[in-house]
Amino acid sequence: MTVPLLSIPSFLLVLLGAGCVCPLSPAFAQSHSPRQSAAKPQTAANPPAEAELEKRISAAQAARATGDPAPIAQSNERLIAFALRDLGQLRLIQSAYPQAVELYRRSLTFEDIPDARVDLAIAELYASHPDDALTESQEVLAADPNNLRALNVSGQASMKKGDYAKAADALDRAARLNPDFDTLYSLGICLLQIKDANADKNKLRAAAVFQQMMQLTGDSGSLHVLFGRAYRDANDMPAAIREFKRAIALDPSTPHAHYFLALAIFATNEWHATPEIKSEFAKELQRYPKDYLANYILGFIASGERQYEVSDKYLETSVAVNPNWPEPWLYMGLNAYARGDMKRAETTFRKAVELTGSDEARSNYQIRRAYIDLGRILEALDAPRKAKPTWPRPAPCRIRCSSKASRMLQRWPWPEAPDPLRPLSPSIPRTKPKPPLLFRRTATHSRASMPR
């Protein structure tokens, strides 16, 4: 169907009003810098894309001047497809992933080209649809096995599904074509995560990949913090501790190096805080007094040791930095409850429950403690039943407990309570109970994820 040029200014004006196309448009990946990660939207200015838009507008105007319906329809459809793709990028920037997916799909009805299909795969990946992202990227790779962006998307989607062997294969091919930082780091993570008969060989390959990264960017403390996190996610704690210590040796002021070292030792020590562990956390705060993570974990440790005033000092600092995470509020409530300050305990428990909402990832033992103690407070105050909180209840406990086990569950601190790394990866979904976030792994890794 012919689409007249005059029928589409409503969304073209969005793009032309600012004088340029959305700067994240990857529609013409061939014009992008080869050192950028091919699986991620571009963040730099994109003059070639702006020139392409102007070229398509000129072509549509020239076709209209001929009066020939066929060229008019073809040029208008190409212009509409380009505009829809850039609107999709705008939605992607705004984290409106379902809308971005729909816009990319609509663009393919006007112009089905590989770059547009990879754009759709990226949107599906950000929308947490790894199967759809794989489908779209594989369709591109079937026609062009060396499409760099499609290989990266395929690798990242397989990582998100936990198929690390398949992800490593795609990322290895991408790294051979273009060994950029993000691709190499993701490849190293996948190699460490593959648990099969070749695990030792894959570990050596991962070490070689990390060495290649050092050659690419130069050695630094922050780089070894990233390596340590990769080993930690693979449950190789000795290697993780080695990398964190190497980071500190290179630069004692490396952000989060002391914190991650302390946390790794904390985990290997079965969450018993030794003087060495507390000293490492304190060193992090000496350099970064407003660090949310270090303040939170020191508050947790002090609370477990019944040093409630010391704990509150750290927890209040973490709340001042980030008031939207429920964990510090929870432990401030537990501190107040232990001291008999029921008014403060009720206020902080309510805040913790409110911020947790219906997030099942946090609605296990730690938030149950808030419900239990808040109920006791209301009962002690002889509050009427109708005054009890009506927030969404956490998911029911799936474990049958004996009376002795039930009493143990009410003890505090809870082993699963520390959630120190959640702010570093807030959008990661959790579908089953996991240990503290020390062992949580991210779906994508980029230079932006490097500490401070």
Image (tube, grey):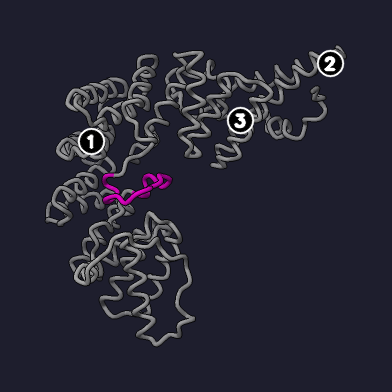
User: Is 436 within the magenta?
Assistant: yes
In the rendered structure, which segment of residues is drawn in magenta? 422-439
Residue 307 is at least partly visible in this image: no
x, y percentage for residue 430? 38, 47
Q: Amino acid at mark 1?
A: Tyr
Which label number is shown at residue 69? 2
**Mark 2 residue crowding within 10 angstroms, few (<14) / some (14–19) / many (20+):** some
Is residue 226 found left or right of 85 in the rendered image?
left
- Residue at x 64% of width, y 28% of height: 21
Q: Which residue is mark 1?
A: 231
The quadrant of the picture occupied by the N terminus is top right
- State the CA–CA distance, disc 2 to disc 3: 26 Å
**Mark 1 residue crowding within 10 angstroms, few (<14) / some (14–19) / many (20+):** many
x, y percentage for residue 407? 22, 71
Tell which circle, 2 or 3, labels the residue nearer the N-terminal end: 2
Q: Which residue is mark 3?
A: 104
- Residue at x 15% of width, y 47% of height: 268
Helix, strand, or loop for circle 3? helix
